[in-house]
Image: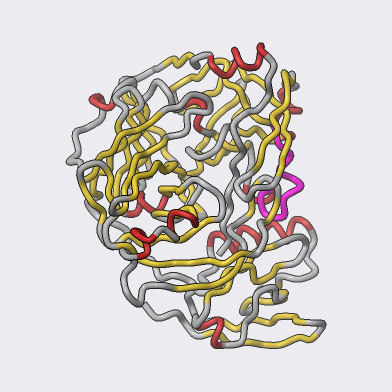
Amino acid sequence: MLILFLAASAVSAQQADLGALFSRPIDVERSAEVDEIGFDWRMNKVFVEASVEGQAAEFIFDTGSPSMISRALADTLELTYVGQNTGVDANGQPLTMDIAVVDMLTLGGTKFRQVPVMVFDFSGLPNGQCLIDGGIIGSEILGGSAWQIDLEDRVLRIAEEAARFEHRPVAHQAALGDFGYPHYPIIEYAIGDLNDRALFDTGSAEVVTLYEQVADARTVRRRVQRRSLSEGRGSEGESAGGVGDMKPLIRATLDGFELGETQLDDVRFTTRGAPPTLLGAGLLRDYIVTLDYPGRAFSLSPRETPDPVRVEAGYGIAFTGERAAVVQLFEQSQADRSGLELGDIVLQIGERDLDGLQPEARCEAVNWLTTDFDPTAAVDLIIEREGERQTLSIPATAE
């Protein structure tokens, strides 16, 4: 399993002209009352076809990130840079990106005018260079519209107001905050007497990812279900600054996660080292999510047919450079009991070679790892540890 976060901080540039640029509302031109855009679902992420200045490409739709255009696309379009953004990525790594303004970003039949974007060279990332085409459509364009993300029908809907959408029963609703550029969807939530705000981030595959200081609060620890805790170590994923450092990892189930006046029960969560808490794309497996910016509401409508409950893998493999390695490992998992160790170089999975690959073949392997490989199934791994080769047989993870 590869976790890929691509997020940058809000712009920190102090120039007055840039301040005016980022505070200016983005003009929206609508061709339909409700614009429906089909999307692809891979790596637990939403991939959409869009165009920048008339140039079509595939983008990740990521509500937890500013929009980012690949350097290759920016060069093709001969974009003019108006400044730079200096901040930190999702793993806390410092990062500087060029800023450009695109006159027209088209998503389906909806046109967004004068959109500020970050420009980033994804070719420097071990995995991102293989998975990302045009870049990321992020949160700048969310303000001023209502959005509905429907994984059941694989459709992203855009309207001037949420009343335009087909009526669906709402199971949970909370206040949606918009604190200005880059217009992240901020959601109020509570766990017991702890009240906080979370970012709805479709770049995160989990249902809930608690900021570790929140997870460590007494009122939260009291609501963790007995015997639901699973501990491990590993990277939280690859961000724009590269693969994150190895850290403690926690999975557990909460009794009671409140959104507005209602409560989600048996919420499975992980933790992260950097704030804020995230509500992630895992919600899409059970709900149609509506982001109603004009009405300032975040709504969850139950799907007619929820996705099956996912079995959690006990380990994760990703390319951290030219070689694949074990980047996550949970204690007492089948992988752990079979002798797998964090940092092991993975030479082969089943019959598939992962070592010594040329760039094109390595990208094929990256796509296979993120799309087709099932780390919960029984598999034989050939690994290298301290220069020695070993074969490990890992049983299937019990449901």
Numbered circles on residues, count: 0
Instruction: Indicate the position of residue 392 as horizontal and vertical percent values.
Output: 63, 87
Direction from residue 265 to residue 109 in the image, left or right? right
Quadrant location of the N terminus? bottom right
Q: Nearer the viewer, residue 383 or 349?
A: 383
Q: Residue at x 75, y 80 (%)?
A: 384
Q: Is residue 385 left or right of residue 234?
A: right
Which residue corresponds to the image point at 58% horizontal and 37% vertical from the top-left? 136
Which of 239/126 is in front? 239
Name the foreground residue: 283 vs 255: 255
Q: Quadrant of residue 174?
A: top left
377 falls in the magenta region? no
Q: Is residue 105 above or below residue 223?
A: above
In the depicted view, which residue is nearer to us: 44 or 368?
Answer: 44
Colouring of the image: secondary structure
**Residue 79 placement: quadrant:** top right
Considering the image in quadrants, where does the C terminus appear?
bottom left
Query: Residue 141: x percent and y percent?
Result: 48, 25
Residue 309 in sight from this viewpoint: no
- Residue 196 visible to the viewer: yes
Tell me the residue at 32%/75% (across/down).
226
Residue beneath the point at 44% across and 67% down: 251
Residue 48 is situated, as x and y percent measured from the top left of the image, at 50, 38
- Magenta part of the chain: 119-128
Residue 120 counted in the magenta span: yes
- The spot of residue 142 in percent (x, y) is 44, 28
Q: For residue 394, what is the image quadrant? A: bottom right
- Vertical relation: 37 (above or below) 396: above
Residue 365 position (above or below residue 127)? below
